[in-house]
Image: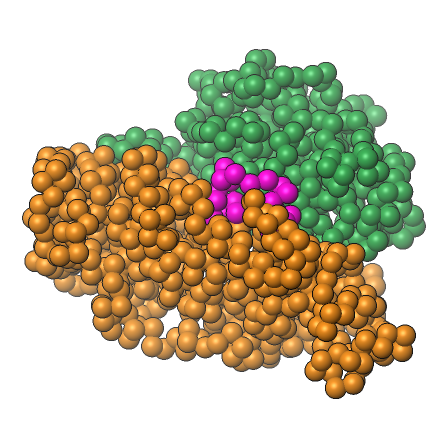
Chain colours: A green, B orange
């Protein structure tokens, strides 16, 4: 921790890099309360990102032979080559904004990771990843919602679980309260001068709604409105010179940072990034995938920078329903595959390391002879984060049926 | 909740069902409908909420007069309903009747050309200023914040196509007298979902809904499935237009010649011909000329290594027909993809049409879902797969479940699904009869179904406009409302379409947005949407909600200081969110 590069409080960057450490250490624990809330921010890359071009196994010759037009060149002087991580893996060149976190050992990667269920359906695979029960379709709630249940506590606020999305994602659906917000600035009743009257009228209506879903959702909504009003996030300016991309994803992350810093009780947050399903003309160092990764990396980098020392209590975790075929298809794209890569960033993350067992890309090492095999169940990663970061000791209710093998040791 | 009146139903339903009593229409008599001869207003409101987008002022009285059974029969035959009012509202939307080709020529291609010109100019600028971060690769647009007036105008023109399409959707829902037809168009579009945001898909959207979906919503499922399979929108959205037999598979070209020889050469060589391949000279239609780029199927023009694309084949089975548990394997997906190889598009970037391209088709033997397809079938290969899927029991069950979910309950009664699936199989997939089975069933009218569903954003927006009698000359604010409620029209990215279950739509943010829409609509804040002066809160309470309000809602509305406020409190109430 001490050796991490320093981020100065005035927002200027020290060295070329930044970590999360010393300003936080300088603060006294008493000043913030003995038990600060741990926060998990999950990011779903919907559409199945091409994990082999996101976290590139440039040490594999098979990677290059399988992808004549899509492969990213080995790390080199050119800016369009892979960003070296450990001499074998590299990041896509457009993910360079994340490199400082790797160097400060706040960013870990789990590769060849995913669901042992073999489905290549986006719908099923997303459903499984969000329900946390691969192979079981009948699970009615999401894993994040089950976490909320398993760790119910008195201080829970309406903002305990928030999706910055127009709809609540599957992972947050369930019987524990969770919020979906498109735009926090628009959150509330807007009726001009009669806003207060109209709001209290609606509140009364929903308080006695016969339908229990509408009743409880209505109550949550009005609690949340009041709380957010008190926190007044309308005057928000990101810290430390963080610049979020103008995309919906970037703006979702910006608003998550607002909620974190407004201290409204945020515990689990969700944002999604779409358009990863590149069956055709995927591009390599530049192109469609590159632009999506650029948005992803700049968004995450801005979030981490903006949260600054708050990152000591935050873990950011990315996921995507499955990986894509090792070989490119006839349309210079990739089809639905199997294993994929996840990224975990945070103050307590034992970063600077690619976790998992690399299965190799030779044909006989592949799943079905075509896809990256899976050596780490995605639930292992979720489970370690829920246990090690969010502090839930018994996770059997969150991941029913999951038998944990040896932990990866992602968290300090 | 006051359900007294509605609770009288089961007895009536039972008596009717057991006695097989006679009803208003001869057809209905034959079909043993569960619709009682005399229905109370709540029953009528329930039906109007489910087979349409809710009651408008006067609707309940009209249906009471003609009889609910007759009304349902009429709705099942939309061609017998004149529907002039909505035609008048859509008269100014000239893109709705244009062919894809026209839309491409007049709206999309000019915009594309102007955009490309601007991009080229911008790339040239980037080359001149390599250190400008805005000019890095992929940031071509970021560097061009100052668009030319021509570009802006072309963009506006291009946006008009989607603007008119999205408006017509919500305006038809709000104003069409063919209410059930609009429910069905929405249902089937969503079932065969395509996404406006995926590449060229939007060029094809207008034609897709108008020509592939709409004419078949009450027809035979096989016809609908076939129309979708050949629709450029679906071919583009699920990539099948690019799916070609991989190298080394059995192919047969014209004159029994293996045409792959023509296709294997690099694009740069295409125009030169190949003296070592005399077959090229005999190519039909080539009149001895060497083949050029333009002669090749577009999917082959720019890329050399070819291959199957499984996307359509998979979703065809998982989402369009059998359902995910419908009993198919990854092997079936591959075989079906082979069957559909060569179902492609002429000039997809210019709004070209469907074409079967034998030179892309995998002509080998196939075994899909137990069906053996011998080589040589050509386009028939795919059609035989569609034939099989369209009459498969898994398809019957999957579609029956989805339709019953739409009309009856999120978790529809199994007995009803069984009967609807049986109707599907018995009638060779006659959608009208399947829907009739569902909406004339005892389950449809059972107390358990009353207000059992939460309105989708489209249901809510359209029903609020209808109930309040608002006059929308501009549909865009309604479209915008749907976006804010999480259901942008034609904007559902995954092929699954939007969920038809309550939990997808009830969340705190969306709920607040519904209340806000109610406020904006009733207070005349939506541009081009005028509230009706003749409709007040009591009209809506009695005609759209059957007077069925909680004490709290009733009291709250009573305290409102203005009529628009009172209307907002009705339309935003928990009661109005349900159907």
Residue drawn at point x = 45 percent, y = 77 percent: B98
Tell me where residue B328 appears, x and y as whole percent: 55, 41
User: Is the C terminus of chain B in the top left, top right, bottom left or bottom right quadrant?
Assistant: top left
Which quadrant is the N terminus of chain B positioned in? top left
Q: What residue is drawn where x is 40% and y is 56%?
A: B221
- Does residue B45 show up? no
Q: Position of residue B350 (x, y in %)?
A: 61, 74
User: Which picture quadrant has residue A16?
Assistant: top right
Provide residue B100's location: percent of width, then percent of height. Answer: 51, 74
B507 to B244, vertically: above or below: above
Say which quarter of the image contains residue B201. Answer: bottom right
Task: Write the start and end of the magenta stretch as one range.
Answer: B317-338
Residue A177, picture quadrant: top left
**Is residue B2 or residue B397 the one in the foreground?**
B397
- Asked if residue A399 lies in the magenta stretch, the reply is no
Residue extending furthest toward the top = A393
Relative placement, left or right, of B421 versus A392 is left
Residue A384 vs residue B513, the one in the foreground:
A384
Judged left or right of residue A54, residue A235 is: left
What residue is drawn where x is 69% and y is 70%?
A: B297
Give the image location of residue B503, x and y in percent: 39, 37
């Amino acid at each position: 921790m001490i050796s991490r590069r320093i981020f100065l409080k005035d927002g200027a960057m020290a060295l070329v890099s930044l970590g999360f450490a010393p300003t936080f250490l300088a603060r006294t624990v008493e000043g913030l309360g003995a038990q600060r809330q741990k926060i998990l921010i999950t990011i779903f890359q919907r559409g199945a990102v091409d994990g082999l071009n996101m976290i590139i196994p440039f040490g594999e010759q098979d990677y290059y032979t399988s992808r004549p037009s899509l492969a990213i060149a080995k790390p080199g002087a050119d800016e369009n080559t892979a960003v070296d991580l450990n001499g074998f893996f590299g990041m896509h060149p457009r993910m360079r904004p994340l490199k400082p976190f790797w160097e400060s050992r706040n960013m870990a990667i789990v590769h060849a990771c995913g669901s042992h269920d073999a489905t290549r359906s986006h719908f099923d695979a997303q459903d499984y990843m969000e329900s946390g029960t691969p192979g079981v379709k009948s699970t009615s709630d999401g894993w994040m919602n089950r976490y909320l249940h398993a760790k119910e506590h008195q201080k829970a606020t309406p903002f305990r679980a928030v999706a910055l999305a127009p709809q609540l994602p599957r992972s947050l659906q369930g019987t524990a309260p969770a919020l979906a917000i498109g735009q926090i600035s628009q959150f509330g009743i807007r009726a001009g001068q009669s806003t207060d009257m109209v709001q209290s009228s609606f509140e009364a209506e929903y308080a006695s709604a016969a339908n229990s879903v509408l009743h409880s959702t209505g109550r949550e909504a009005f609690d949340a409105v009041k709380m957010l009003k008190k926190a007044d996030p309308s005057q928000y300016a990101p810290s430390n010179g963080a610049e979020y991309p103008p995309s919906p994803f970037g703006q979702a992350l910006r608003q998550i940072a607002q909620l974190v810093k407004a201290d409204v009780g945020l515990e689990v947050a969700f944002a999604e990034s779409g358009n990863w399903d590149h069956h055709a003309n995927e591009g390599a160092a530049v192109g469609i995938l590159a632009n999506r990764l650029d948005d992803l990396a700049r968004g995450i980098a801005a979030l981490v920078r903006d949260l600054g020392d708050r990152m000591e209590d935050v873990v950011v975790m990315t996921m995507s329903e499955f990986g894509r075929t090792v070989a490119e298809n006839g349309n210079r794209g990739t089809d639905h595959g199997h294993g994929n890569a996840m990224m975990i960033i945070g103050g307590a993350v034992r970063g600077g390391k690619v976790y998992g067992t690399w299965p190799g890309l030779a044909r006989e090492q592949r799943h079905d002879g075509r896809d990256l095999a899976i050596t780490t169940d995605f639930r292992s990663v979720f489970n370690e984060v829920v246990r090690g970061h969010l502090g839930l000791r018994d996770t059997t209710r969150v991941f029913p049926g999951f038998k944990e093998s040896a932990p990866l040791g992602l968290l300090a | 909740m006051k359900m007294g009146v509605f609770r009288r139903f089961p007895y009536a339903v039972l008596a009717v069902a057991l006695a097989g009593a006679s009803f208003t229409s001869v057809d209905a008599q034959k079909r043993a409908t569960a619709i009682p001869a005399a229905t109370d207003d709540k029953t009528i409101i329930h039906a109007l909420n489910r087979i349409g987008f809710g009651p408008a002022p006067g609707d309940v009285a009209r249906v009471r007069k003609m009889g609910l059974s007759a009304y349902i029969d009429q709705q099942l035959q939309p061609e017998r309903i004149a529907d002039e009012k909505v035609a008048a509202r859509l008269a100014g939307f000239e893109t709705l009747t244009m062919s894809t080709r026209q839309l491409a020529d007049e709206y999309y291609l000019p915009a594309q050309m102007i955009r490309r010109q601007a991009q080229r100019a911008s790339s040239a600028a980037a080359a001149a200023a390599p250190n400008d971060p805005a000019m890095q690769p992929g940031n071509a647009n970021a560097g061009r914040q100052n668009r030319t007036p021509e570009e802006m105008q072309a963009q506006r023109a291009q946006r008009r196509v989607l603007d008119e399409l999205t408006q017509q959707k919500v305006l038809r829902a709000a104003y069409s007298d063919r209410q059930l037809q609009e429910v069905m168009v929405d249902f089937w579009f969503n079932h065969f979902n395509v996404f406006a945001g995926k590449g060229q898909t939007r060029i094809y959207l207008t034609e897709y809904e108008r020509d592939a979906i709409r004419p078949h919503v009450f027809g035979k499922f096989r016809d609908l499935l076939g129309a979708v399979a050949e629709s450029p929108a679906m071919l583009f959205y699920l990539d099948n237009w690019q799916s070609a037999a991989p190298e080394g598979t059995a192919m047969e070209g014209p004159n029994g010649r293996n045409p792959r020889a023509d296709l294997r050469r690099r694009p740069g060589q295409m125009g030169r011909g190949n003296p070592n391949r005399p077959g090229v000279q005999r190519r039909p239609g080539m009149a001895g000329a060497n083949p050029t780029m333009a002669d090749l199927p577009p999917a082959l023009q720019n890329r050399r290594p070819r291959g199957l694309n499984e996307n359509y084949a998979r979703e065809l089975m998982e989402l369009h027909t059998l359902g995910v548990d419908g009993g198919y394997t990854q092997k079936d997906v591959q075989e079906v993809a082979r069957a559909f190889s060569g179902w492609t598009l002429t000039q997809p970037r210019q709004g070209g049409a469907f074409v079967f391209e034998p030179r892309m088709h995998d002509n080998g033997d196939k075994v899909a879902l137990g069906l053996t397809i011998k080589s040589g079938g050509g386009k028939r290969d795919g059609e035989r797969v569609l034939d099989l899927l369209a009459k498969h029991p898994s398809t019957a069950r999957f579609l029956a479940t989805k339709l019953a979910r739409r009309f009856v309950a999120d978790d529809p009664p199994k007995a009803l699904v069984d009967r609807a699936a049986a109707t599907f199989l018995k009638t060779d997939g006659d959608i009208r009869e399947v829907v009739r089975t569902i909406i004339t069933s005892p389950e449809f009218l059972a107390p358990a179904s009353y207000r059992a569903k939460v309105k989708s954003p489209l249901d809510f927006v359209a029903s609020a406009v209808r109930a309040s009698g608002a006059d929308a000359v501009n549909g865009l604010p309604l479209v915008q409302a749907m976006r804010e409620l999480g259901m942008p029209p034609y904007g559902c990215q995954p092929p699954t379409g939007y969920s038809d279950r309550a939990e997808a739509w009830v969340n705190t943010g969306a709920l607040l947005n519904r209340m806000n829409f109610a406020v904006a609509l009733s207070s005349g804040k939506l541009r081009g949407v005028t509230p009706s002066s003749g409709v007040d809160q009591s009209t809506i309470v009695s005609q759209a909600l059957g007077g069925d309000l909680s004490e709290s809602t009733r009291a709250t509305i009573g305290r409102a200081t203005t009529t628009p406020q009172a209307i907002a409190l009705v339309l935003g109430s928990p009661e109005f969110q349900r159907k």
